[in-house]
Image (spheres, grey):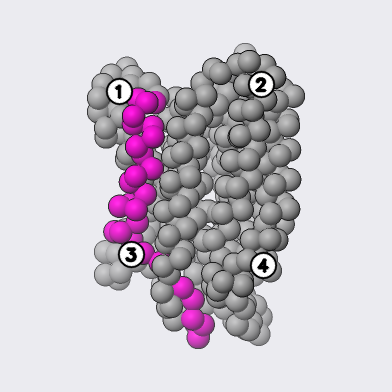
Amino acid sequence: MIVSLITLTVSFLVTYFITPLFINYFNSIGLVNSDVHKKTKTIVANSGGIPVISGIVMGLFTYIALKTFIYKDATSLIELFSAITSILIITFSGFLDDLNSKPQKYEGFTYKSGLKQWQKPLFTLPAVIPLMVINAGETTMSLPLLGLVNFGLLYPLVLIPLGIVGCANMVNLLGGFNGSEAGMGIIYTLSLGLYALYAHQNIAAIILLSTTVSLIAFLNFNFAPARILSGDSLTYALGGIVAVCAILGNMEKFALVTMSLFIIEWILKLRSLHDLKHFATSLGHLDKKTMLITSKYDKVYSLTHIAMGKNGSTEKVIAVKLVALQILVAVIPWILFVKIV
């Protein structure tokens, strides 16, 4: 318990104090983007995943050091190092996406957009290797109607890559409003982390809860009006963390239900591709007089369009609605999978 508390404290403090340094540094080197839902052109630092992951990793290294030197306990450290490696690779993939963003026009603003949708899975694919080589997770899963199914080599060779790449890219689809990505991330990593504790999956729990506290620290700088945007480095990382911990903690079904909003978002985006012949944006149209944001589409092509409402909502309200929706969804797997005696 003491080791975990120290770990979480380190993750929070490192993220809280290092984020302003990264904000200044990113501004100085031009790693910035337009904050489009603002009355006037606002340029802010981008790629918030870097300070968040810095806090998480420093916390986890503290955990490893305390376990190794104080408690002489090397249990599951191979799995933890593999998880850290996978998370760093997927964060780096998102960071490359942020670095290679190209100017795009939207609502009179110029903002930067990175890789094309079909390119993103290819960049996140290397992140699966650390978990594949240690054969992480359990190859036997309980499936509806089929019961227990042993996937054998299909689990590390097919299911792990699909899980990590799919989850990272789905999380990247939903966002675009100050605080929404970090706020939703706080909810689903907290829920998953608590379930991992309940299931005695300590490695998954410490990774997820370190992520939760780092996001809480980061939200201070990311909520509207943001001083730093999440960027693809954060959304990729959050999706990767969820997938990695679901695999290590053998909690795939719980994670799947918890992250169902992102599956719905993916379906809505596919609907937009069918109807519009291109992916619809999650962003909205800002009325600069009322500061209300409305959807530019007649149909719903994103959960953000629902959050905007028929008459529009402010950016803060949209972010809060998305977080509230994530809270509701996060309760469902507890009802389905946790037996309260």
Q: Give the secondary structure at mark 4.
A: helix
| Residue 24 tag number | 4
Upstream in the sequence, badge 2 or badge 3? 2
Q: On the image, which quarter does residue 230 sit in?
A: bottom right
Residue range corresponding to the magenta coloring:
107-136
The three-letter amino acid code for the residue at tag 1 is Leu
Q: Specify whether 313 is left or right of 113.
A: right
Upstream in the sequence, badge 2 or badge 1? 2
Q: Nearer the viewer, mark 4 or mark 3?
A: 4
How far apart are labels 2 and 1 at the CA level?
Answer: 48 Å
How far apart are labels 1 and 4 at the CA level?
Answer: 54 Å
Q: Nearer the viewer, mark 3 or mark 1?
A: 3
What is the x, y in percent for residue 226?
A: 66, 66
Q: Nearer the viewer, mark 2 or mark 1?
A: 2
Which residue carries the number 1 mark?
Answer: 145
Upstream in the sequence, badge 3 or badge 1? 3
Q: Are marks 2 and 3 in contact (CB under 8 Å)?
A: no
| Residue 69 tag number | 2
Q: Is residue 117 magenta?
A: yes
**Above/below status of 323 relative to 71:** below
Q: Nearer the viewer, mark 4 or mark 2?
A: 2
- Which quadrant holds the C terminus? top right
How far apart are labels 3 and 1 at the CA level?
Answer: 38 Å
Upstream in the sequence, badge 4 or badge 3? 4
**Above/below status of 13 relative to 332:** below
Which residue carries the number 3 mark?
Answer: 116
The three-letter amino acid code for the residue at tag 4 is Asn
Q: How dense is the environment of label 4, judged by Cα within 10 Å: few (below 14), some, or many (20 and up)?
A: some
Q: Specify whether 257 is left or right of 230.
A: left
The three-letter amino acid code for the residue at tag 3 is Lys
**Above/below status of 339 relative to 15:** above
Q: Specify whether 59 is left or right of 238.
A: right
